[in-house]
Amino acid sequence: MTFWDAPTDGTRHVDLLDASGTPTTSVTTDEYGSLPRFQGPDNVTGMWADAGGSRRAWMDAHGITGGGSGGGSGGGGFTALCHLVASATAPASVRAAASYVCTGTADQTVIQAAIAAAQSEGGGVVQLSGGTFNLTAPITINGTANEDNPLTVTLAGVGEFATLLKPASNVDGIVLSNWAQCHLRDLGIVVSGSGSGIVSKAVTVPGADTRSFWCSSFRNLRITGHYIATNTGWAMDLDMPFRSVFDNVEIEGTRKGMRLYNNSSIQNAGDCDFRRMFIELVGTGGVAIHVESANGNMNQNNFSMVEAGANGTGCTGILIDGAAGGASQRFWGTNLEQFDTLINVPNGESNTFDLNYVTCRDGYAGAKAFVFGSWSHNNRVHARWVNINSAGQLKLIEDANTNSKSPNIYDGIRIEANSGSNTTYSFVSRVILRDILSQDSGTVQAGLLTLSTNPNLVPLTDAATITTDASRGSHFKVSLAGNRTLAAPTNPLDGQRAIWEVTASGAARTLTLASGTGGFVFGSDITALTATASGKTDFIGAVYSSAANAWRVVAYAKGY
């Protein structure tokens, strides 16, 4: 590599010092293209690097300690773009080329030295080879609590199954703190005991805010507990994360999945994006995704194409809680399988759950799908496929929200109620139910199945007693071939309005409206129906009152 003062042509810098302080006019990279540490001319803070290709690349200088005298002494410090760390099991050629070589014992000390070197240069890449790195203490990446000088570190492996960090039992894998800015990618972490894979610890800066890490990325990671049910740690336990991206993360066989924790009244953490994640729990009482706001609000996190499953009892898919409540979480295209409770929001508002396929644990009689606490309001649930196995029991909705002005909304939910299954629901104050439908032969509690108001006619079957399912629409049509009774409509909603369009076929016909529980009642203006003339159509309008448990006849028009 040669170095110049311009992107093209210009004057070449030849007053350089290598890492040992020996004068040199050029610098040679290693076999991986990494530059060793060297120094440039006095008072030069940047140079254009030329590797003999079609263009030059700009390099900034960073202050470093050490170096020789003469020549470029006192000039800018130009350092390795990548610090290669070889595992004890890496091939000999990789170990020979590496700047840092591990022994297989307490490998975090070697990795920590590479991180320190990268940060001493203003930030850099620490590249781990393939193989296993045994840790007796966590790898720590700290920031500077300074947004303008974060000393960003990239810690990279060569693949989730090729580069493995293996902490000892009860030891965390990676700890981030002090406003760290980092990028973790292409590696795996094996956790055991109470140890967690990735942990972050927040630091408060007076007059500023509280963060553990920010503007960071986590890509192509695999965190596994090897399906040992006695482990108790999290795959990721993140205190005050901020404005970061998680992409293609696999969490397999851990007791707990991922926790996002807000514990500061001066900062609402979050604003993170989670994409294409898989979480599989083992053991009892685990939570796949836990959003907790003990103080301040963990908010505005986006989860896209996240799938989670459980292999134990007492597990919850998504939990949003904490004294301060969690707000504005967005889940898109989410799958949840074999949890005792799919979604539990004891305290949270304005969260959106857009689900693909969900199902509770097979054979569990206490299974619950969507649970909301007394002040959990304005949440929206949409589920394309809620599966209930044969003879299964499911409480689809358990809504304890007492804020009637801001109800939770359940819409676009399809229940696959397999044979012998039973689906129930409950609410305390008010809910909005829309476009909830069921297929197959299982039992669904009356009032749960609803369709949005449908301007199209819903045909009714003519019989001695004509039945109406009010959840199917709002405009019903029937042709009478004899005198009939219109039975009390099933599955009504409070305030629902409906019209019956009745045509007499073959002769004048009399339609009697069923009274009694859930039936029809007349007021003082409209007191009864009269016969419909042959070939003519009459219209009957009614509004359902849940307080009266009756359809109140409010309109009657004849002779069309």
Image (tube, grey):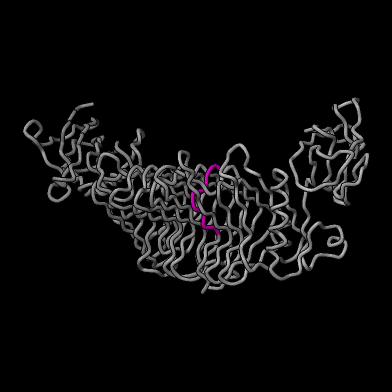
Q: Residue 521, percent across and down?
A: 12, 41
- In the rendered image, is residue 412 in sight? no
Q: Is residue 443 depicted above or below 380 in this figure? A: below
Q: Quadrant of the N terminus?
A: top right
Farthest residue to the front: give it.
Answer: 69
Q: Quadrant of residue 98?
A: bottom right
Q: Is residue 241 magenta?
A: yes
Please, what is the dominant secondary structure of the magenta stretch?
Answer: strand
Residue 535 in percent (x, y) is at 24, 31
**In the rendered image, which quarter contains the C terminus?**
top left
Pick the residue in front: 76 or 285. Answer: 76
Apparent side of residue 259 relative to residue 36 in the rendered image (left or right) = left
Query: In the image, is 119 to the left or to the right of 213?
Result: right
Which range is magenta? 236-244
Of the pair 127 and 290, the residue shown nearer to us: 127
Residue at x 86%, y 65% (from the top left corner) = 92
Task: Please say if 61 is above or below 381.
Answer: above
542 drawn magenta: no
Q: Residue at x 80, y 65 (%)?
A: 90
> What residue appears at the point 42 percent right and 56 percent down from the top-left corner?
319
